[in-house]
């Protein structure tokens, strides 16, 4: 399960490295082909179109990634048994018996066998206080931890497996950033600061005795493990989106300023009367001379005061 999660992380990095560029080219081709957007008349306008399309592609893919992260969450054991997260063992047993009668292979045939086995696993885990505590925090992989029996052993093994994200994430980011010529400087500091902040939050969630407030508000009916998985995915895609969107927005601002200058939004020397320019130059020269005289006078006064001391 941890290997699968790390592979998903690598795939997310790679998809964000290539997809925005592909979508940008496709979008511009579409807009130009159907005359929705007039073809650029100069390089500056072409660059503005390209950066605008890329910004749209990044934001659209970000929104899509967010929705997919939530929608593709598999049902947890509580949802399978149609129970709330704070259910008691008696209600677990009652719900399992009801669903077992409904989906038993003897009643629905072989097509219900897989679901019946899953319901049985859900019942067994939620009936065991230690397994249930570990499942809520580390997911269904706790069923494969044959060498973990006590709660302490489950927690130690779970915490060791959880640290993988915080090792793989910086390594993959550094590799792709190196080959992709990514941004350097302050962004790396803030990325690491956010990463360690999320690590602190994750440890708080994992070590909480009761179901924490944050996931109960933001993603009700999801386990702590599912909430943390969503946090990992949201952190990664937001980081990658901001890394690509920042330079694009800066380029758009620069091109907008260039167009203002070229278009005459800011007055140019050619638009002004030569006599007016001469008068302005005389005023500037006069002010400059006056400031120089005052500076010399202040400097002389300071020297005199120092000499007197």
Image (tube, grey):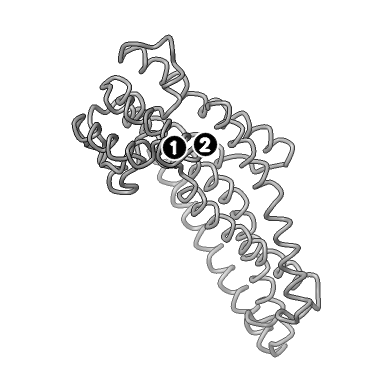
Asked which quadrant contains residue 182, the reply is top right
Q: Which residue is mark 1?
A: 115
Residue at 70% in and 60% down: 23
Task: Provide the residue designation for mark 2.
Answer: 189
Q: What is the x, y in percent for residue 203?
A: 36, 27
Q: Residues within 10 Å of mark 1 (few under 14, many from 20)?
A: some
Q: Are marks 2 and 1 in contact (CB under 8 Å)?
A: no
Q: Is residue 185 above or below residue 270?
A: above
Q: Is residue 158 visible?
A: yes
Report the side of 60 relative to 205 (left or right): right
If the image is split into quadrants, where does the C terminus sit? top left
Residue 228 in the figure: left or right of residue 6: left
How many labels were placed on the picture? 2
For this view, does 107 lie left or right of residue 96? right
Residue situated in front as seen by the camera: 142 or 308? 142
The percent coordinates of residue 131 (x first, y second) are: 33, 21
Q: Position of residue 224 (x, y in %)?
A: 35, 35
Residue 4 falls in image quadrant: top right
The reply to whether residue 197 is in sight is no
218 or 150, nearer to the observer? 150
Q: Quadrant of residue 214?
A: top left
Residue 179, relative to residue 42: is it above or below? above
Q: Identify the element where label 1 is drawn.
A: helix
Give the residue drawn at x 36%, y 36%.
Answer: 77
């Amino acid at each position: 399960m941890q290997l699968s999660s790390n592979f998903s992380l690598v795939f997310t990095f790679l998809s964000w490295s290539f997809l925005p560029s592909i979508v940008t080219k496709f979008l511009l081709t579409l807009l130009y082909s159907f005359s929705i957007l007039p073809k650029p008349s100069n390089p500056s306008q072409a660059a503005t179109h390209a950066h605008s399309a890329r910004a749209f592609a990044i934001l659209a893919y970000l929104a899509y990634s967010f929705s997919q992260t939530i929608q593709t969450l598999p049902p947890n054991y509580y949802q399978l048994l149609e129970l709330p997260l704070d259910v008691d063992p008696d209600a677990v047993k009652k719900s399992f018996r009801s669903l077992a009668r409904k989906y038993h292979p003897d009643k629905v045939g072989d097509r219900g066998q897989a679901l019946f086995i899953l319901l049985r696993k859900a019942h067994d885990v939620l009936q065991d206080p230690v397994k249930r505590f570990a499942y809520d925090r580390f997911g269904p992989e706790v069923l494969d931890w044959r060498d973990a029996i006590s709660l302490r052993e489950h927690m130690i093994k779970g915490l060791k497996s959880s640290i993988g994200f915080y090792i793989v994430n910086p390594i993959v980011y550094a590799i792709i950033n190196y080959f992709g010529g990514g941004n350097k400087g302050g962004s790396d500091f803030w990325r690491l600061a956010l990463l360690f902040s999320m690590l602190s939050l994750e440890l708080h969630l994992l070590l909480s005795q009761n179901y924490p407030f944050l996931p109960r508000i933001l993603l009700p009916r999801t386990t702590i493990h599912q909430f943390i998985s969503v946090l990992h995915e949201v952190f990664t895609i937001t980081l990658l989106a901001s890394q690509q969107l920042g330079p694009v927005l800066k380029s758009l601002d620069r091109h907008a300023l260039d167009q203002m200058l070229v278009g005459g939004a800011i007055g140019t020397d050619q638009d002004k009367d030569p006599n007016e320019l001469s008068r302005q130059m005389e005023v500037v020269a006069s002010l400059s001379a006056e400031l120089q005289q005052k500076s010399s006078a202040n400097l002389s006064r300071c020297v005199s005061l120092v000499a007197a001391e």
